[in-house]
């Protein structure tokens, strides 16, 4: 059996969210072949590939009603296309010599995010050239993000994707409505990233770690794609969001996109679920802290084998970050307050 663990978009872009690394270390310790992927960083890097950004400008230009800010960004598209590759490499720490050009003021095209910009020597001093440039490069990408939200996908955000929909935990209706709409260009890029891993790894089970509301839509969109194009693959969702918002799951609608929902720490439930799947999904006695859909009754069932032994801390193993593109993450400085940068800058 082969497992693919996925962090769907989007969490912070400066470092991998650690859940899949912990689960991979545990599963490999138990002899289960496991791979992992962070579709958040992959999606953002795909968006800012020159060819895809060019397509975004093309689609945005077809909109009839756009704000003056969006029109300004479109008017400057050649400047954005000429600089985007270098800016991404700079924020990855691969092109530090670009900092003077960014800070000098003539390199980056500027839109609304730069409108309140003041003299920043008070924040970065004369020695903080790299940090100053990171801040300006972050504003540059946020301008492009504003264009995407206005003209391409209103639910896009750099550290959250469709978070507004994920927060409506009292009803599955709004997020399902979005899932059943024609996919946006951003959706298509996400599913291209997913399909690449499915074709390469050919997993039997795909697990989605959903720590925040902003990860829910991405997980369900991927689950929808797998259900349609790879029905032989089983999918499971766990993480902070299900643990807090889906503990009393009763709506069967979520199981149109995901096969199983895991509660609490994922090690034990996931190990039991893999055993259940490997044995043909007939005897559910190995399942604990797992929601599944009873296909006969069309009712959500919570399986919790009380005899299952808890996984001790000494049995968890070591987190394994292999497969994750650690050199490709982006360091953002969204605001100059040094306390706020801890979430988005560095690892």
Image: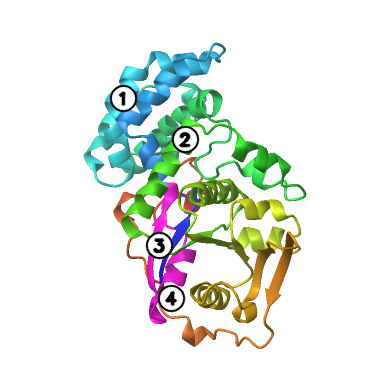
Foreground of the two, 298 or 37: 298
Q: Are marks 2 and 4 in contact (CB under 8 Å)?
A: no
Which sits earlier in the primary sequence, circle 4 or circle 1? 4
Q: In which quarter of the image is the C terminus?
A: bottom left
What is the quadrant of the N terminus in the image? bottom left
Distance, label 2 to label 4, CA atoms, is: 32 Å
Residue under label 2: 186
CA–CA distance between discs 1 and 3? 36 Å
x then y, percent, for residue 147: 49, 25
Q: In this view, does 22 lie to the left or right of 255?
A: left
Residue drawn at (29%, 47%) of the image = 93
Of the pair 168 and 15, the residue shown nearer to us? 168
Does residue 117 appear in this view? no
Q: Viewer-nearest of labels 4 and 1?
A: 4
25 inside magenta stretch: yes
From mark 4 to mark 1, how far is it between C-alphas? Answer: 43 Å
* SS for dot 2: helix
- Callout 1: few (<14), some (14-19), or many (20+) C-alpha neighbours within 10 Å? some
Of marks 2 and 1, the one in the foreground:
2
Verify CB contact (< 8 Å) between mark 2 and mark 3: no
Which residue position holds label 1? 81
Q: In this view, does 298 lie to the left or right of 199?
A: right
Dot 2 alpha-carbon crowd within 10 angstroms: few under 14, some 14 to 19, many 20 or more: many
**Image spot of residue 190 (x, y percent):** 44, 42
Picture disc at residue 27: 4
Q: Give the range drawn in magenta.
A: 13-40
Q: Which residue is drawn at 68% across and 74% down?
A: 303
């Amino acid at each position: 059996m082969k497992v693919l663990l996925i962090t769907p978009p989007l969490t912070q872009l400066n470092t991998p969210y650690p859940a899949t690394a912990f689960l991979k270390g545990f599963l490999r310790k138990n002899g289960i072949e496991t791979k992992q992927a962070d579709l958040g960083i992959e999606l953002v890097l795909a968006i800012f590939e020159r060819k895809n950004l060019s397509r975004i400008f093309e689609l945005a230009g077809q909109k009839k009603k756009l704000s003056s800010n969006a029109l300004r960004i479109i008017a400057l598209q050649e400047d954005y296309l000429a600089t985007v590759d270098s800016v991404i490499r700079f924020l990855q720490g691969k092109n530090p010599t670009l900092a003077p050009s960014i800070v000098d003021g003539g390199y980056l095209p500027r839109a609304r995010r730069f409108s309140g910009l003041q003299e920043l020597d008070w924040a970065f001093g004369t020695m903080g050239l790299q940090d100053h440039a990171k801040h300006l490069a972050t504003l540059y990408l946020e301008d492009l993000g504003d264009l995407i939200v206005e003209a391409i996908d209103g639910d896009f955000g750099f550290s959250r994707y469709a978070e507004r929909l994920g927060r409506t935990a009292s009803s599955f209706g709004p997020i399902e409505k979005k899932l059943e709409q024609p996919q946006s260009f951003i959706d298509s890029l996400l599913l291209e990233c997913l399909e690449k891993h499915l074709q390469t790894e050919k997993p039997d089970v795909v697990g989605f770690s959903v720590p925040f509301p902003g990860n829910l839509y991405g997980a369900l969109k991927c689950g929808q794609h797998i259900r349609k194009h790879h029905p032989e693959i089983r999918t499971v969702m766990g993480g902070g969001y299900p643990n807090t918002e889906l503990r009393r799951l009763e709506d069967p609608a979520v199981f149109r996109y995901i096969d199983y929902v895991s509660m609490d720490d994922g090690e034990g439930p996931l190990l039991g679920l893999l055993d259940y799947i490997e044995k043909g999904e007939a005897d559910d006695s190995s399942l604990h802290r797992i929601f599944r859909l009873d296909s006969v009754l069309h009712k959500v069932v919570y399986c919790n084998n009380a005899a299952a032994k808890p996984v001790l801390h000494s049995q968890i193993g070591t987190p394994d970050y292999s497969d994750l593109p650690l050199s490709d993450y982006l360091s953002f400085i969204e605001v100059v307050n040094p306390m706020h940068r801890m979430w988005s800058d560095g690892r």
